[in-house]
Amino acid sequence: MLIKVPEKSEIKEYDVTDEGIYVRRRDFMKTGAAMTAALAIPGCGYSEPPAGSARRVSHPRGQKISGYKKTKFGEDLKPTAYKHVTGYNNFYEFGTAKSDPAKHAHTLKTSPWNITVEGEVAKPGNYQLEDLMKKMPLEERIYRLRCVEAWSMVVPWIGFQLSELLKMVQPTSKAKFVEFVTLKDTQQMPGQNYSVLQWPYTEGLRIDEAMNPLTLLAVGVYGEVMPKQNGAPIRLVVPWKYGFKNIKSIVKIRLVEKAPETSWNIAAAREYGFYANVNPEVSHPRWTQARERIIGSYRRRKTDMFNGYADQVASMYSGMDLRKYF
Ligand SMILES: Nc1nc2c(c(=O)[nH]1)N[C@H]1C(S)=C(S)[C@@H](COP(=O)(O)O)O[C@H]1N2
Ligand SMILES: [Mo]
C-alpha cells in the first residue's frame, strides 16, 4: 500500500526496526485517508512495517495434530517465530492490514468443512475434510514463503501432497488446469463486503504444477491445526510461487481445460501474472523483486530463483519466456 510515511521519510525499509517508528506508522495507517488509499491500490505492499503487532493480539495456541510424518524438507531452514507466522498475515477477507486476520478471523467456522471437487475428473464429489485427512498421508514440511510484496518467512506446514487428492479423483485427459476457490460468506468473512478483490478469492495452477510433489494442501502449522488467519481449515502451499497463489480456506477444486481467472490477476493483470513464479530478475512494476525483508529479523536477503526450489520445478518451464509468462 504505497503510503508515504509522513515523518522520517529518509528511513529505508530495512531501517524500520524501532518500535516507536513502527507504532507511529500504524497510527497513520489507521486514518481514513490511509485506509482509502490502501483499499484503492491493489497489490498492497511495501510500506507495511515488519511484524510486531502480534504482541498486541493474543494467539491462543491451537489443537495439536497427531500422526504426521517429519520430513527432510527445509531441515536446514530456521522457521519464522510462531507469533509472526500467525500475526503477520495477508487474508483480505478479514481486512487489508497485516494484523487484521489474527484479530478478525475468529468469525470463520471451520467445522464441519466440505470441499467440492468437480469438473474434468472421473470421480467428482463432495468431501468432508475430516474424512479426507484420514485418507491422506500427513507430513510436516518446512518451506520458504515469499510474498510478492518482497518479504519472506519460513513456515513449518503440515499437510499432504495435492497430487494425492488429484490421483484419487482421477483427472480426465482434458484437465489442463486446476482452479481453487475460497469460501464466500460475508457473515463469516466481513472483508468480502469491500470490493478490494473480486470474491470469492480464486487461484489456479497448471496441472503439472498441481501434481508437482512440492505442492501441498496444508491443514496445520507448527504441529497444530491451521490457525484461522492462516487459511483454516485447508489452504494451498506452492513454495516456488509468490504468496498470493497460496489460496486459503478452500471450498472448491475444479479441474478445467482452460486457465482459470484468478483474483489478483483480475485486479491488476500487469502486476500479478497467472504463473507468479518467484523471480528476482522480473521486477514488479512498482518495486524490485531482487531482495526480500525477512520477517522477524532486521535483515534482508537476496531472493532466489523459484524461491530456492529451482531444482524441483525449473524443468516445468523450460522453453518458456518467464518475462512474458510472469
Ligand atoms: N483467500 C485468500 N487467500 C490468500 C490471501 C487472501 O487475501 N485471501 N492472501 C494471499 C497472500 S498475498 C499471501 S502472502 C498468503 C499469506 O499466507 P499467510 O498469512 O499464511 O502467511 O496468503 C495468500 N492466500
Ligand atoms: Mo502476498
Image (cartoon, rainbow, N blue to C red):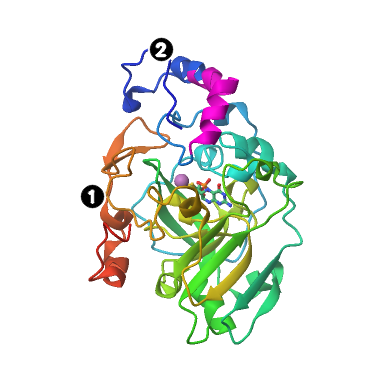
Residue 33 in the magenta stretch? The answer is yes
Quarter of the rendering containing residue 170: bottom right
Nearer the observer, 144 or 199:
199
Vertical placement of residue 25 versus 220, above or below: above
Q: Can residue 153 be seen?
A: yes
Q: Amino acid at mark 1?
A: Glu
Q: Earlier in the sequence, mark 1 or mark 2?
A: 2
Q: Judging from the image, what secondary structure is the residue with disc 2 in?
A: loop
Name the residue beneath numbered marker 2: 7
Name the residue beneath numbered marker 1: 281
- The x and y percentages for residue 142 are 43, 55
Quarter of the rendering containing residue 229: top right
Instruction: Check whether the beta carbons of the residues at disc 1 and disc 2 lie within 8 A of each other.
Output: no
- The x and y percentages for residue 294 are 37, 38
Q: Which residue is pictured at 47% across the width and 56% down the height?
A: 245
Q: Can residue 98 be seen?
A: no
Residue 29: give its label: none
Q: Judging from the image, what secondary structure is the residue with disc 1 in?
A: loop
- The x and y percentages for residue 1 are 46, 32
Callout 2 crowding tier (Cα within 10 Å): few <14, some 14–19, many ≥20: few
Residue 282 in the magenta stretch? The answer is no
Vertical placement of residue 252 versus 41, above or below: below
Q: Amino acid at mark 2?
A: Glu
Vertical placement of residue 182 versus 34, above or below: below
128 sits to left or right of 141: right
Q: Is mark 1 within 8 Å of ligand 2?
A: no
The magenta stretch is: 25-41
Callout 1 crowding tier (Cα within 10 Å): few <14, some 14–19, many ≥20: some
106 sits to left or right of 1: right
Q: Which residue is pictured at 51% across the width and 43% down the height?
A: 85
